[in-house]
């Protein structure tokens, strides 16, 4: 810049535009300086202000703090915010809240979490619905792993923003998972084993086409014998009469018998393992199954079946390598056993490896084309793969295969149910409804079909009352239907009945068999509990019904 008059006038123009009144003061100052040094500098010093009120001064300190913050000078920014906080008159509550919030932001950069939290505390005390401060405090609580408080704060943000803030939702999800893990591992220690519903037990055994022990249990040609039954035969009678609670002790009795007296050691191990699995006692189940797997003399079929069962437990306890390892062993030992491929296919489907799942199901059906559950699950897997790879030809074929499966196995409820789920996904709602009704006719005792149908009505027609009624019917039919409690709970959350929802989630938790399930259910419950707490604290959010 030169000292020519032209330079001067353009500078004046810029200053006036940029700084308003203060520009004039600056210009005067610059005049004095430039007349001394004969050099032109941009205005660089804070002008002396006239009659600045304490509030204006505080705002100036804040602005200064913000500038320092932007330049990464966090300690200096904090010093400016300190001055702002000390200067501002008490009645400027919202501004004071902002200063605390800004200072918290600087502390956050310095990773001083307890200072972040206490500044946010002050900001929120002054301004209860201060989203930024709530969100910042939630982040700090998350970092120091105070999940309970993190959840309450992030729930506040979600409610204030009507669940429209993606990053808050993701945080809520993370925090709920951590909180769920903490609660679940605690709850697993105090868990009381529960015999699941009859339907659940039936579904479990029905998923094996070649379980040699299950076959023995169903076999009625040989009379059980005279007099008082012992051991495995006693368990067999208990199974037939659905007195499931007697099965584990009867198997233990068999295992207590001397070698000479016992004919069913491996059968007793297998059956006890199944019931330990069904009651969520996974460690005991694995122990029995491993005994079969390691026994030299055990029958090949019983060994292969034990490997499949141990693989499923490894899946549920999230030990995926061990799970796949067991399946590999089962496949090499039982190359002709369709159950191996059917069950491995299910695991691969859960892992969303649809290509591998398909080749397993293909093998399973090839080995046993008359086992309806594997046939229909193959259709379902083909459908999933078609959707994933956008393969229209395969899609049409899978739908055709579903229809053929229904024709071939008209009395298997599973075929209707899976096809109905597919039709729901394709928004072929009336076809799905028709299929569910047929499934209900075949097996009116399967409560989970009622739940699925309720979900369909909700999605199709938004008929919330009818959907809730079907889910309540499901619970009436089967008071141990965990799926019904969980699903109805989420419906009640959606319509704001948080207290009812929490109660339903607690009932599902009492029935949960694995830690994985518990983590999920605790997350649902804790989310509802936090919403209830925050909504009443802030007087916002869902209406509170009891
Ligand atoms: C979410 O809310 C916080 C706090 O109000 C805000 O800082 C952030 O920018 C929001 N994020 C999105 C994606 O809306
Ligand atoms: C879940 O965790 C919270 C916080 O740790 C605790 O207050 C609550 O009692 C726990 N619930 C159960 C059932 O363990
Ligand atoms: C009950 O229905 C579920 C699906 O809702 C299905 O997976 C299961 O196989 C059915 N159980 C029986 C015994 O048919
Ligand atoms: C098995 O044997 C042990 C000791 O030998 C005994 O304590 C236990 O009660 C027996 N259990 C059954 C079910 O017979």
Image (cartoon, helix red, strand yellow):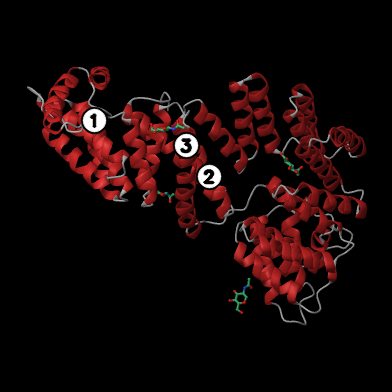
The reply to whether residue 234 is in sight is no
Q: Which residue has dot 2 on it? A: 521
Residue located at (55% from left, 30% from top): 491
Element carrying mark 2: helix
Q: Quadrant of residue 321?
A: bottom right
* Mark 1 residue CB less than 8 A from any atom of ligand 1: no
Mark 3: few, some, or many residues within 10 Å (few <14, many ≥20)? few
Q: Which residue has dot 1 on it? A: 42
Q: Which residue has dot 3 on it? A: 167
Q: Nearer the viewer, mark 3 or mark 2?
A: 3
Find residue 175 and report its horizontal and vertical position in percent.
45, 45
- Name the one closer to the observer, 42 or 331: 42
Quadrant placement of the N terminus: top left
Q: Quadrant of residue 416?
A: top right
- Name the one closer to the observer, 211 or 244: 211
Residue located at (68% from left, 54% from top): 243
Element carrying mark 3: helix
Number of numbered discs present? Answer: 3
Find residue 291 and report its horizontal and vertical position in percent.
71, 74
Quadrant placement of the C terminus: top left
Residue located at (70% from left, 58% from top): 312
CB contact under 8 Å: marks 1 and 3: no
Mark 1: few, some, or many residues within 10 Å (few <14, many ≥20)? few
Cα distance between the residues tagged 3 and 2: 22 Å
Cα distance between the residues tagged 1 and 2: 64 Å
Find residue 338 and report its horizontal and vertical position in percent.
86, 57
């Amino acid at each position: 810049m030169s000292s020519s008059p032209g330079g001067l006038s353009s500078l004046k123009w810029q200053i006036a535009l940029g700084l308003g009144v203060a520009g004039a003061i600056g210009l005067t100052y610059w005049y004095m300086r430039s007349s001394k040094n004969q050099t032109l500098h941009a205005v660089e010093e804070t002008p002396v202000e006239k009659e600045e009120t304490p509030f204006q001064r505080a705002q100036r300190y804040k602005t200064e703090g913000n500038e320092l913050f932007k330049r990464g000078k966090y300690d200096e920014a904090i010093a400016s915010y300190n001055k702002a906080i000390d200067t501002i008159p008490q009645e400027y509550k919202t501004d004071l809240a902002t200063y605390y919030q800004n200072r918290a932001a600087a502390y956050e950069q310095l990773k001083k979490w307890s200072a972040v939290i206490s500044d946010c505390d002050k900001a929120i005390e002054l301004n209860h619905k201060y989203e930024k401060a709530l969100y910042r405090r939630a982040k700090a609580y998350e970092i120091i792993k105070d999940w309970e408080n993190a959840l309450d704060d992030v729930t506040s943000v979600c409610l204030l923003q009507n669940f429209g803030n993606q990053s808050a939702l993701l945080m809520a999800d993370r925090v709920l998972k951590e909180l769920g893990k903490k609660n679940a591992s605690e709850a697993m220690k105090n868990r009381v084993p529960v015999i699941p519903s009859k339907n659940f037990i039936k579904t479990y055994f029905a998923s094996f086409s070649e379980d040699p022990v299950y076959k023995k249990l169903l076999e009625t040609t040989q009379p059980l014998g005279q007099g008082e039954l012992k051991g495995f035969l006693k368990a067999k009678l208990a199974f037939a009469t659905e007195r499931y609670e007697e099965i584990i002790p009867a198997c233990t009795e068999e295992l207590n018998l001397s070698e000479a007296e016992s004919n069913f050691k491996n059968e007793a191990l297998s059956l006890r393992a199944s019931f330990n699995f069904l009651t969520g006692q996974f460690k005991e189940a694995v122990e029995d199954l491993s005994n079969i797997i390691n026994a030299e003399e055990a029958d090949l079929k019983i060994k292969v079946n034990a490997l499949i069962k141990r693989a499923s437990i490894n899946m549920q306890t999230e030990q995926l390598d061990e799970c796949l390892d067991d399946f590999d062993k089962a496949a090499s030992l039982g190359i002709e056993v369709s159950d191996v491929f059917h069950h491995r296919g299910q695991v691969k489907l859960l892992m969303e490896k649809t290509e591998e799942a398909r080749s397993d199901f293909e093998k399973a059906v090839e080995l046993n084309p008359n086992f309806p559950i594997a046939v229909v699950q193959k259709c379902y897997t083909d459908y999933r793969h078609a959707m994933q790879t956008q393969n229209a030809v395969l899609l049409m074929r899978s739908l055709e295969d579903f229809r053929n499966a229904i024709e071939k196995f008209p009395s298997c409820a599973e075929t209707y149910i899976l096809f109905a789920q597919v039709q729901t996904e394709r928004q072929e709602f009336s076809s799905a409804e028709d299929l569910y009704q047929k499934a209900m006719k075949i097996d009116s005792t399967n409560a989970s079909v009622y739940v699925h149908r309720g979900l369909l009505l909700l999605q199709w027609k938004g008929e919330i009352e009818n959907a809730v009624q079907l889910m309540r019917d499901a619970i009436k039919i089967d008071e141990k239907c965990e799926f019904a409690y969980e699903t109805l709970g989420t419906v009640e959350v959606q319509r704001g009945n948080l207290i009812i929802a929490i109660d339903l989630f607690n009932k599902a938790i009492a029935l949960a068999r694995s830690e994985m399930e518990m983590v999920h259910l605790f997350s649902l419950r804790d989310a509802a509990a936090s919403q209830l707490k925050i909504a009443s604290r802030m007087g916002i959010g869902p209406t509170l019904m009891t």
